[in-house]
């Protein structure tokens, strides 16, 4: 059985591909979004500060920084041999449901609250028109939420733009600059553990 591993932007968790049987929607239509402060995320109180105006004032951040160091999703499957499961197996279906619950409830990293960051990722559109894209999910690897199930909530950022981004399409690789907040969102494309008020986006180019 082959394994699916998250690429370099994401954390290297491995899960059997045969567990992934979810359908995916690539709709551009606006999806209803419910936003709430993440339960149990005791982010430190911060005085509101002015947003940076220069790209260099945003800290380059890796996706692994969004995952609490003590969070281990594999603990939910302790004692279960995932490699032995086959499609259609009742245990496989149960494991899939459990995995989705664990990933959707993945905790955010409290120290990231209010951080002004730049982070690379792939675009999952939520709302846009001929004037440009106004709202999307940013994910760490190609195909997430569209060609494969959503990653953990702490590996999805719900982005809203101060100005529509022109020419940005589904699964484009971009840099996003903005202030990050710990907030849980639920959309038709996946559940996110962060929200960003993005000030700008640029086409992705490696900094190396």
Image: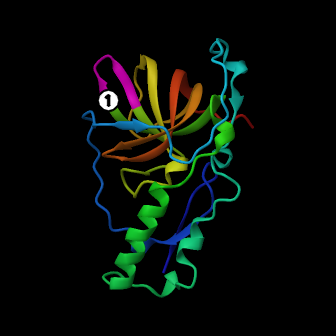
In this rendered view, identify the residue nearer to me: 180 or 10.
180
Q: Is residue 99 left or right of residue 14?
A: left
Instruction: Provide the major secondary structure of the magenta segment.
Output: strand
Would residue 105 be visible to someone looking at this image? yes
Above or below, comparing residue 54 to residue 182 in the picture: above
In this rendered view, identify the residue nearer to me: 74 or 201.
74
Residue 134 is covered by the magenta coloring: yes
Residue 22 position, x and y percent, is 32, 63
The magenta region covers: 128-135
Q: Residues within 10 Å of mark 1 (few under 14, many from 20)?
A: some
Residue 48 position, x and y percent, is 63, 17
Look at the image and name its color scheme: rainbow
Which corner quadrant of the image does residue 121 belong to?
top right
Q: Is residue 129 left or right of residue 185?
A: left
Q: Quadrant of the C terminus?
A: top right
Question: What residue sits right under mark 1 in the picture?
Answer: 127
Above or below, comparing residue 93 to residue 171 in the picture: below
* Residue at position x 52%, y 24% in the image: 198
Residue 71 position, x and y percent, is 64, 59
Which corner quadrant of the image does residue 7 belong to?
bottom right
Which corner quadrant of the image does residue 70 belong to?
bottom right
In this rendered view, identify the residue nearer to me: 37 or 199.
37
* Residue at position x 57%, y 65% in the image: 73
Q: Residue furthest right?
A: 208
* Residue at position x 39%, y 50% in the image: 145
Above or below, comparing residue 50 to residue 92 in the picture: above
């Amino acid at each position: 059985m082959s394994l699916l591993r998250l690429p370099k932007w994401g954390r290297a968790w491995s899960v059997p591909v045969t567990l992934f049987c979810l359908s995916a929607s690539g709709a551009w239509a606006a999806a209803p979004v419910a936003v709430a402060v993440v339960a149990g995320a005791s982010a430190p109180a911060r005085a509101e500060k002015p947003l940076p105006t220069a790209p260099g004032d945003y800290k380059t951040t890796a996706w692994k920084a969004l995952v609490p160091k003590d969070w281990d999703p594999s603990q939910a499957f302790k004692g279960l041999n995932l490699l032995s499961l086959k499609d259609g197996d009742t245990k496989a279906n149960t494991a899939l449901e459990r995995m989705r619950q664990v990933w959707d409830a993945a905790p955010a990293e409290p120290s990231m609250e209010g951080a002004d960051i730049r982070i690379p990722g792939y675009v999952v559109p939520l709302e846009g028109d001929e004037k440009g894209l106004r709202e999307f999910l940013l994910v760490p690897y190609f195909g997430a939420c569209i060609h494969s199930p959503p990653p953990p909530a702490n590996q999805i950022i719900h982005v809203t733009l101060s100005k529509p981004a022109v020419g940005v399409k589904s699964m484009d690789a971009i840099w996003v600059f903005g202030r990050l907040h710990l907030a849980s969102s639920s959309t038709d494309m996946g559940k996110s553990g962060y929200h960003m008020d993005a000030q700008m986006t640029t086409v992705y180019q490696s900094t190396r």
